Image (spheres, helix red, strand yellow):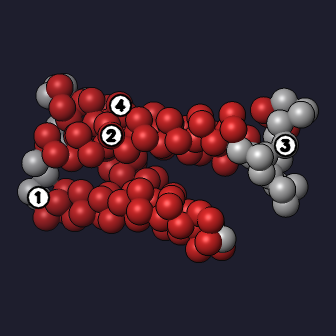
Amino acid sequence: MTTPVGLFMLVMGIGMAGMWSVDILRSPEIDRTRGLLRARDRNGSVMAPHWLAEYATAATMLVGGLGLLLGWSAGPWAWLVPIGLGALAYTGLNSQAWVLAERSRYAYGIPIAIGLVGPLVAIGLIIAGILALPVG
């Protein structure tokens, strides 16, 4: 089970980072005139903390997924697997509110739903002992 979970984590990590990068550069809803650290959405919310959380989730997913796929030996990196999966589940659930708030965002709903269901399945595999993490 490590290969499918590792692939899922890698694909989701790349997808998250890619989707956010495109959105940051192109979204007309983001005011970037004062720089990225002071960028705000149309409601005035500062975006940098949110982006940091999303990119940290993506990076954690990437490293954890690579570790599973490449069969890294036991070590502290293995904690990135459940941490990344938990962070992705949280952002998947939280982002559903953003999707449901506006009909034009519904296209994002499918990948975001996958970002909720996928980690819940993987966490269930860990809890059930079907996916053993290389911790030592």
Q: Nearer the viewer, residue 105 or 121?
A: 105
| Residue appearing at x 84%, y 56% in the figure | 42
Pointer 3 local density, CA inside 10 Å: few below 14, some 14–19, many at least 20:
some
Estimate the x, y position of residue 78 in percent, counting from the top left.
Answer: 28, 37
Question: Alpha carbon of mark 3 to alpha carbon of mark 2: how far?
Answer: 29 Å
Which residue carries the number 4 mark? Answer: 63
Dot in front, 3 or 1: 3
Residue 84 in view, yes or no: yes
Question: Alpha carbon of mark 4 to alpha carbon of mark 1: how far?
Answer: 21 Å
Estimate the x, y position of residue 81 in percent, counting from the top left.
Answer: 31, 44
| Residue appearing at x 13%, y 51% in the figure | 131
Question: Alpha carbon of mark 2 to alpha carbon of mark 1: how far?
Answer: 23 Å
Q: Are marks 3 and 2 in contact (CB under 8 Å)?
A: no
Question: Alpha carbon of mark 3 to alpha carbon of mark 4: how far?
Answer: 31 Å
- Name above or below for residue 65 compared with residue 103: above
Which residue carries the number 3 mark? Answer: 31
Dot in front, 3 or 4: 3
Disc ID at residue 11 = 2
| Residue appearing at x 33%, y 40% in the figure | 11
Q: Secondary structure at mark 4?
A: helix
Which residue carries the number 1 mark? Answer: 129
